[in-house]
Amino acid sequence: MAEVKIPRATAKRLPLYYRYLNILHDGGKTRVSSTELADAIHVDSATIRRDFSYFGALGKRGYGYDVDNLLEFFKNILHQDRLTNVALVGVGNLGHALLNFNFHQDSNIRISAAFDVNPKNVNTIQGGVPIYPMDQMINQLRDQQISVAILTVPAKVAQDVADQVSEAGVKGILNFTSRRLDVPDDIRVHNVDLTNELQTLIYFIDHYDDTTEE
């Protein structure tokens, strides 16, 4: 399948579509309209049709979308036909929560290796995931061919850790720290700042009447 360049906003919605199509499939539904999808996932039907149009004719006017065909399409687009291993760096409170979260229930993503400095964590297995000392991180990332890392380390060491995972060949970083990272151009960073998200939510509650998600 040729690579399709789509807007970032559309790309962010693809996992949402995939997750709901799985729910429809498990419920035995064979066909769905853009209006039904819109009602379920709170994205307007025009946006859904526009998102789908980037990939060609996925449905038929007057018929809607075949659930199984659409599910298989998004499965391939999101590479859910293969297992993706990711690394977790930092096994504090948030790191422990992520280890205990079973990505397998919703996707073909799993944390296959974790790294920490705490002697109580190092050389143990938690949530089925081995935890290695930090001085083994670069070699383990290379040996296991891991291309995505989740950072839940203190902000003061985040850049140093980012430098190390970059050296190891990681191509994507999910950054849960408050530090904005300086990485090579060929590495993509997604920042998840929980404090910022909560502050933004509270601001919208206080200043806007519309409760629709932006």
Image (cartoon, grey):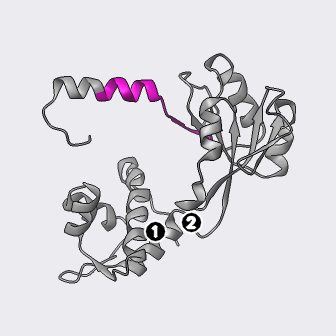
Q: Which of 73 and 89 is in front in this view?
A: 89
- For residue 80, the mark is 2
Q: Position of residue 19 (x, y in %)?
A: 43, 62
Q: Position of residue 70 (x, y in %)?
A: 40, 75
Q: Nearer the viewer, residue 101 or 37?
A: 101
| SS for dot 2 | loop
Answer yes or no: do the residues labelled 2 and 1 have beta carbons within 8 Å?
Answer: yes
| SS for dot 1 | helix
Q: Where is residue 111 in the image (x, y as percent from the top left)?
A: 68, 49
**Crowdedness of circle 1 by 10 Å Cα count: few (<14), some, many (20+)?**
some
Q: Residue at x 38, y 62 (%)?
A: 17
Q: Does the magenta stretch include residue 92?
A: no
Residue 23 relative to residue 86: left or right: left
Tell me: residue 1, above or below residue 40: below
Q: Which residue is drawn at 65% across and 37% down?
A: 96
Rounded to the nearest whole Å, what is the CA distance between mark 2 and mark 1? 8 Å
Amino acid residing under circle 2: Gln
Q: Does the magenta stretch include residue 195?
A: yes
